[in-house]
């Protein structure tokens, strides 16, 4: 049975997700990207206690690209997290692996290079270096995910619901645009539009992030992945109403072969925004011209 | 400064490597002829520029032989992010590259590193696709057997220096060419908007597209031009002396899909700047003409960007994708007859009788001439050369060689820096 891992979008309402979630992925202010909220270490402490009390697994995303100037704070956080009862730390920047190896922390590492986690060979490369989990890329097919599962000892975390991250830049692209053309906007979230598709775009302290126009809807595929014993299904609440998300989590937790029709009907009624299957059935191509 | 590249009298004893792109065998030869110390190329498989012509194994062999005969090096990009299916034949391919004697491979996916270390003696460089930004990451890759890291383009001068001081590993930095708007490896816009995999060489440059921008209430935010991710290009021309003093191992020019004129021009200019600074460090002066020539060769504005910690709106490019095609490149010298002093030229852009032009080539000072006589292939006098790739002859007193190029005359002012 796959565990349900959630990315919450409210600090205050985390308790409401306890019933149907097995694991929580939480961000740290200034060290995480592509998460709707970031905690300070002080804010994190009571949340961890709450989750520990309810025997929930806890993962912390230290998943931004780390510059030298981030290292002091990063090391401080990695060190303090060792005193907290957490299960793992998501990393994008490879510097984290070096720091981790040096200090041999109690928690495990999650290879979370977002778009680069695309094959089982590289899963095994990191596994041999002591990395226990991998967050699988949102741009590979269901078939590829299953093939990875069958060929690695790593525990896999598969994105199954939510807007998918597709771009991270250090540049402040919205701020730059507004400044360049002397415009004003106080929006914390904007949208860029192409061929009728609206892509959420966020410009914050870390730079700019862009997300998919459609919500990944892997409700049916979650049953396949559960059967294949994928360890974690990841549900992202970014840009989704909390109450709707709570119901979605409940559906993913409880859907099975017997109730799936009813569950999928309920699911489809809940989501008003456009959804699609992402890349679960769509292989990307890269060779568009034959070599002469 | 602790770069270890100076003698006691402060002359520079170790020049940085000038590393040029080559999308095919012809470009490889042009890059080397114009002064590159090394070139990077892609095979027909496993490289991140799937739309460049790229090299077959036989062509790699020929390219390596051409380079090695001239004391130059060839690096092969094996830098796609692998999917399960891509690993088939990878080991065999790496063995072939090793057998050919390429000087290094450039990798992104650690599986390539792992296989190369297990089955070959290939030197391994880490691609910028891994976005190495700090000394902890550099230290990790060194332990894994990487000998050189192509640094992330988001690094400042201080960042590079700190990594250099903390980790004893070769450092390669971009000095010229197009920039990604995102951290390398962290953009899959192409995957979502065109179903082409950006991390397997299918980047369709969505960052240069225009978009409508809406606020959180779906109200349009309208500037004089549309929103775009697009950034200006990178040019480190003014900072080459600083970068040499920092002890950076290799200076990389971007653009495996660029034209031979672009490659020859850019390599030639950076070759001159590196050589001039290394030879006359104390009396070096910045040549403003070089900047103008580089600027004209790319048709896009270029700035140093992150090196100076500047990545604000001054680095953005909002032009509705209107770019002017390059008109400076006039022709290629195919042949020269010393008896008649007639040069055979293949035309690339319109020129005419009376034009003042500049002829440049490897290891020569540019020659400025006014075109007085032009003959067509029937040996008839003509006034203008307007047909693409038209073969003509012009009179030039100085002896020319094949590979020399003709461009519009620039300026020649030097400023002290």
Image: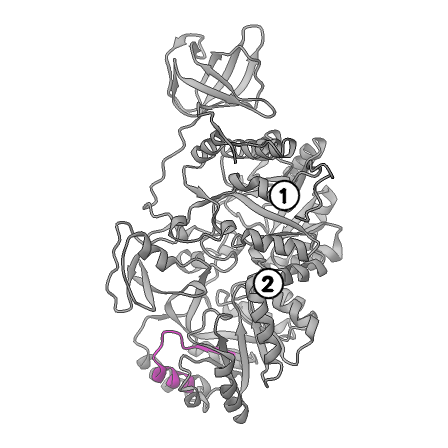
Give the residue furthest to the left. B219
User: Where residue A40 sits: x, y (%)?
Assistant: 49, 78
Q: Is residue B94 above or below residue B134?
A: above
Marks 2/1: CA distance?
43 Å
Quick check: marks 2 and 1 in contact, CB under 8 Å? no
Q: Residue A249 lies in magenta, yes or no? A: yes
**Nearer to us in this view, B207 or A49:** A49
**Nearer to us in this view, B67 or A100:** A100
Q: Chain of mark 2?
A: B
Residue B332 badge: none
Q: Chain of mark 1?
A: B
Query: Which scheme is used to colour this image of the protein?
Result: one colour
Q: Quadrant of residue A81?
A: bottom right
Picture mark count? 2
User: Where residue B97 sits: x, y (%)?
Assistant: 69, 46
Q: Is residue B243 above or below residue A232?
A: above
Describe the element under mark 1 as helix, strand or loop.
Answer: helix
Drawn side of residue B165 relative to residue A193, left or right:
right
Drawn side of residue A153 relative to residue B215, left or right:
right
Residue B84 badge: 2
For disc 1, the neighbor class at 10 Å (few under 14, some 14 to 19, many from 20) is: many
Q: Sequence order check: which comes first, mark 2 or mark 1? A: 2
Q: Give the labeled residue for mark 1.
A: B245
User: Where residue B36 sits: x, y (%)?
Assistant: 61, 35
For disc 2, the neighbor class at 10 Å (few under 14, some 14 to 19, many from 20) is: some
Give the residue furthest to the top. B339
């Amino acid at each position: 049975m796959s565990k349900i891992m959630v990315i919450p979008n409210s600090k205050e309402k985390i308790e409401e997700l306890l019933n149907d979630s097995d694991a929580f992925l939480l961000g740290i202010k200034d060290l995480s990207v592509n998460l709707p909220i970031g905690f300070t270490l002080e804010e994190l402490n009571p949340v961890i206690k709450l989750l520990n009390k309810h025997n929930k697994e806890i993962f912390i995303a230290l998943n931004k690209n780390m510059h030298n100037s981030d290292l002091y704070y990063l090391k401080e956080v990695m060190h303090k997290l060792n005193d907290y009862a957490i299960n793992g730390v998501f990393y994008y920047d490879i510097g984290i692996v070096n720091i981790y190896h040096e200090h041999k922390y109690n928690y495990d590492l999650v290879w979370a290079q977002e778009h680069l986690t695309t094959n089982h060979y590289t899963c095994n490369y990191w596994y041999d270096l002591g990395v226990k989990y991998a967050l699988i890329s949102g741009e590979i097919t269901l078939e590829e995910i299953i093939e990875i599962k069958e060929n690695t000892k790593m525990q896999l975390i598969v994105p199954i619901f939510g807007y998918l991250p597709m771009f991270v830049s250090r540049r402040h692209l919205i701020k730059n645009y507004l400044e360049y053309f002397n415009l004003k906007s106080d929006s914390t979230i904007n949208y860029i539009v192409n061929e009728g598709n609206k892509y959420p775009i966020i410009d914050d302290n870390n730079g700019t992030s862009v997300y998919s126009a459609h919500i990944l809807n892997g409700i049916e595929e979650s049953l396949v992945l559960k059967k294949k014993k994928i360890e974690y299904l990841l549900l992202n609440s970014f840009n989704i109403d909390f109450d709707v998300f709570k119901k979605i989590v409940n559906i993913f937790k409880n859907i099975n072969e017997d109730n799936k029709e009813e569950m999928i009907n309920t699911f489809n009624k809940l989501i008003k925004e456009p959804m699609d299957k992402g890349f679960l059935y769509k292989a990307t191509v890269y060779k568009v011209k034959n070599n002469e | 400064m602790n770069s270890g590249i100076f003698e006691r009298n402060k002359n520079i004893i170790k020049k940085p490597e000038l590393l040029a792109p080559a999308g095919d065998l012809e470009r490889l030869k042009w890059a080397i002829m114009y002064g590159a110390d090394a070139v990077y190329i892609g095979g027909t498989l496993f490289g991140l520029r799937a739309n460049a012509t790229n090299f077959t194994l036989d062509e790699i062999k020929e390219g390596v032989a051409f380079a090695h005969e001239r004391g130059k090096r060839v690096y092969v990009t094996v830098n796609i992010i692998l999917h399960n299916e891509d690993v088939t034949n990878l080991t065999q391919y790496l063995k072939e590259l090793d057998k050919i004697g390429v000087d290094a491979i450039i990798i992104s996916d650690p599986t390539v590193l792992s296989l190369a270390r297990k089955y070959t003696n290939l030197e391994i460089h880490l691609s910028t696709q891994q976005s190495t930004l700090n000394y902890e990451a550099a230290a990790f890759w060194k332990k894994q057997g990487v000998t050189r890291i192509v640094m992330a383009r988001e690094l400042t001068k201080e960042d590079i220096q700190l990594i250099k001081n903390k980790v004893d590993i070769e450092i390669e930095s971009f000095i010229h060419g197009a920039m990604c708007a995102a951290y390398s490896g962290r953009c899959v816009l192409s995957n979502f908007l065109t179903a082409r995999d950006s991390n397997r060489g299918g980047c369709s440059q969505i960052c240069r597209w225009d978009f409508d921008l809406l606020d959180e209430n779906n109200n349009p935010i309208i500037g004089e031009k549309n929103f775009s991710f697009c950034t200006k290009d990178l040019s480190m021309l003014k900072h080459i002396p600083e970068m040499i003093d920092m002890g950076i191992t290799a200076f990389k020019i971007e653009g495996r899909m660029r034209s031979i004129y672009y490659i020859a021009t850019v390599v030639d200019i950076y070759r001159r700047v590196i050589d001039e600074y290394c030879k006359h460090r104390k009396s070096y002066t910045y040549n403003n003409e070089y900047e103008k020539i580089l600027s004209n060769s790319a048709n896009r504005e270029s700035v140093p960007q992150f090196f100076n910690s500047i990545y604000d709106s001054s680095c953005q490019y909002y032009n509705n994708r209107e770019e002017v095609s390059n008109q400076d490149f006039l022709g290629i010298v195919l042949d020269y007859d010393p008896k008649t002093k007639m040069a055979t030229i293949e035309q690339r852009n319109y020129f005419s009788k009376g034009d003042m032009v500049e002829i440049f080539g490897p290891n020569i000072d540019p020659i400025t001439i006014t075109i007085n006589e032009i003959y067509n292939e029937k040996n008839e006098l003509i006034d203008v050369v307007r047909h693409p790739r038209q073969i003509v002859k012009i009179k030039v007193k100085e002896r020319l060689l094949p590979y020399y190029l003709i461009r519009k005359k620039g300026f020649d002012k030097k400023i002290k820096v």
